[in-house]
Amino acid sequence: MSNNLKTSVQRVQDILKSHNLGLNVVQFQTTTRTSQEAADTIGCTVAQIAKTLIFKTKKSQKPVCVIASGVNRVDEKKIANYIGEAIERPDADFVREHTGFAIGGVSPVGYEFDIKPLIDEDLMKYEELWAAAGAPDASFRLTPQDLIKITHGTVADIKKA
């Protein structure tokens, strides 16, 4: 771990430290922007990548956080059923405005939404997960239980069949 973390990455590290779980950000020499790149760089399976996706509700335009296994596509209709409103994919400006992170480095922590995050139930199968840490070259290792604790998320069936 570098002592000279980017501002967005340091923000994630500070939040992780506040949870007292021993979670630490690692900055890599190569990009971890996609689930495949992250898995290749880290040396884990794509399924162990906890990718954070931001959607917005169609009517109220509220941000929605979904944390999915790197191998899964999310079912937007299932998400809509959980939150009670249809969702759509936002542009990069919406994501940055509501999270403070650029797409490719959106962390599952560092922002609060009215709607609690939905966590892909498939992530619960693994002893170890990796999530983005605020930049496209930074990640952190955690357990599924850590993910629930730090995000206050709800585990749900959100993958597309």
Image: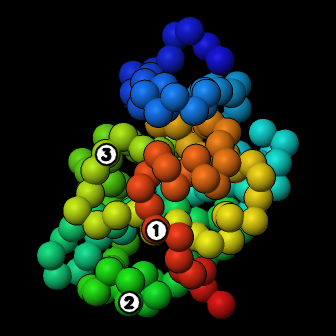
Q: Which amino acid does label 2 sit on?
A: Asn
- On the question of residue 146 being in view, the answer is yes
Q: The residue tagged with tag 1: helix, strand or loop? A: strand
Q: Name the residue under label 1.
A: 154
Instruction: Kindly check if marks 2 and 1 are in contact, taking CB atoms under 8 A apart as contact.
Output: no
Image quarter of the C terminus = bottom right
Q: Does residue 58 lie above or below 21 as drawn?
A: below
The alpha-carbon separation of the residues under discs 3 and 2 comes to 23 Å
Q: Is residue 45 left or right of residue 26?
A: right
Label annotation for residue 81: 2
Dot in front, 3 or 1: 1
Q: Is residue 30 above or below residue 32?
A: above
Q: In this view, does 63 lie above or below 143?
A: below
Q: Horizontal and vertical percent for residue 28?
A: 68, 27
Q: Residue 8: x percent and y percent?
A: 40, 29
Residue 138 location, quadrant: top right
Compare residues 127 and 56 and report the one nearer the observer: 127
Q: Name the residue under label 3.
A: 111
